[in-house]
Amino acid sequence: MAASTVRINLDGKPINPLTILMIGAGGFIGSHLCEKILQETPHKILALDVYSDKIKHLLEPDSLEWAGRIQFHRINIKHDSRLEGLIKMSDLTINLAAICTPADYNTRPLDTIYSNFIDALPVVKYCSENGKRLIHFSTCEVYGKTIGSFLPKDSPLRQDPAYYVLKEDTSPCIFGSIEKQRWSYACAKQLIERLIYAEGAENGLEFTIVRPFNWIGPRMDFIPGIDGPSEGVPRVLACFSNALLRREQLKLVDGGESQRTFVYIKDAIEAVLLMIENPDRANGHIFNVGNPNNEVTVRQLAEMMTAVYANVSGEPALEEPTVDVSSKEFYGEGYDDSDKRIPDMTIINKQLGWNPKTSLWDLLDSTLTYQHKTYAEAVKKVISKPTTS
Ligand SMILES: NC(=O)c1ccc[n+]([C@@H]2O[C@H](COP(=O)([O-])OP(=O)(O)OC[C@H]3O[C@@H](n4cnc5c(N)ncnc54)[C@H](O)[C@@H]3O)[C@@H](O)[C@H]2O)c1
Ligand SMILES: O=C(O)[C@H]1O[C@H](OP(=O)(O)OP(=O)(O)OC[C@H]2O[C@@H](n3ccc(=O)[nH]c3=O)[C@H](O)[C@@H]2O)[C@H](O)[C@@H](O)[C@@H]1O
């Protein structure tokens, strides 16, 4: 972008260049948001994270057209006195930092709760005390299970959207029992949402809460044994990509019957940029950000990814591309699942006029093309190495 072009917001007003503190900038969403902001706006980014691999291409070399508009701070927000200073220096703080992989929720529930609630507290407090705006990343998991999932299997009401569409201002948050530690993440996210909302109500904090619904695309998570731990379990896109790259069967947890709506990261980031640049329309709101048109069961996702990857790689799919596994075997004790996640889009449509564009097939095509280009050779090398006994 020509950084000098004057940008106009949805109300026709010029947008002043901002300094944005982005906490968790080195992650999947952060890396795409940094790219978008640097390429299309004049805003400056103070990028905070413990890792920078996913934004390395934006930080080096110094000759990049946006050099000087992004500054990396290797900081762990758990214990660093520089956090408040950075919040004070910025017009807006965006908090993305979290443990957000389901394999951790039931096996590392304390880390999950600390990361999603306790570690976010100082961020909220410093924004509130210093009169700074906050965009906080929550999750669609705060809705938990749908009301419809408690109806008898053959109830016609299960087909009624009133029993499954998830609305920011009216849907309840339905979690499982305490021993189902899967919900430690959703519960921590819900409590931080409530705290932010209360800071808004009692102390005037200017906030926006984002509830992402399965955003997927390049740079999501890691491929075990390549750029992450061999025994690590990332989210479903990376699990299935890993299996496809290794020509192994895709594992369907409890039959792959759960349903998800997937949205392309590049569509979703457009929504976040609208929030950043339209504070009058975004402040005080909680936004679902997803694509209600891209709903599949996890089994259907596996079948579609298998077909797309065969096209992309030119290698025929396995004869039996999937295998069923129990959730206990895959995730361990305490796992539970959301049955269905369809976002209601009324509020984001009304406030920001945002709609997702990319079909599931197209977003899988570009994402798996990226996965193949980035990882296929490395995976082949690892597979061909003789194993030591
Ligand atoms: N990707 C999705 O579809 C999705 C869906 C729902 C919610 N979210 C939420 O969006 C946010 C970002 O998700 P993501 O997919 O980019 O995850 P991610 O794991 O790729 O990114 C999170 C980043 O935060 C950093 N981080 C974590 N703890 C930190 C700490 N103490 N100090 C400094 N940095 C820290 C991590 O190093 C990582 O780079 C999270 O809050 C997540 O709960 C994401
Ligand atoms: O992305 C989101 O919107 C939110 O949901 C995700 O939770 P979930 O969708 O359950 O996590 P995935 O790992 O993407 O799993 C999706 C589904 O696929 C299944 N799965 C996963 C991996 C696998 O190899 N096989 C498999 O069948 C899971 O059991 C689950 O039903 C994560 O909790 C968060 O990143 C986020 O808050």
Image (cartoon, rainbow, N blue to C red):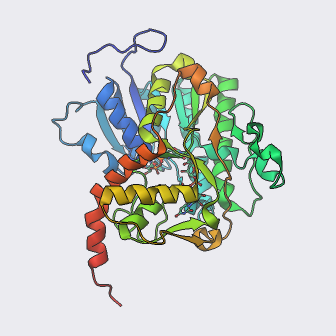
* Residue 331 image point, x, y percent: 59, 68
Above/below status of 188 relative to 276: below
Q: Is 322 placed left or right of 193 in the picture? A: left
Above/below status of 343 relative to 151: above
Q: How many marks?
A: 0
Image quarter (top left, top right, bottom left or bottom right) of the N terminus: top left
The reply to whether residue 82 is in sight is no
**Residue furthest top as drawn:** 12
Q: Could you tell me which residue is drawn at 56 percent across and 18 percent down?
A: 281
Q: Is 36 placed left or right of 204 in the picture? A: left
> Camera-side residue: 161 or 8?
161
**Residue furthest left as drawn:** 63
The reply to whether residue 14 is in sight is yes
Q: Classify residue 323 by image quadrant.
A: bottom right
Q: Could you tell me which residue is drawn at 32 percent across and 26 percent down?
A: 40
Above/below status of 70 relative to 318: above
> Camera-side residue: 194 or 363?
363
* Residue 243 image point, x, y percent: 43, 67
Q: Could you tell me which residue is drawn at 24 percent across and 21 percent down?
A: 2
* Residue 49 image point, x, y percent: 40, 46
* Residue 60 image point, x, y percent: 21, 43
Image quarter (top left, top right, bottom left or bottom right) of the C terminus: bottom left
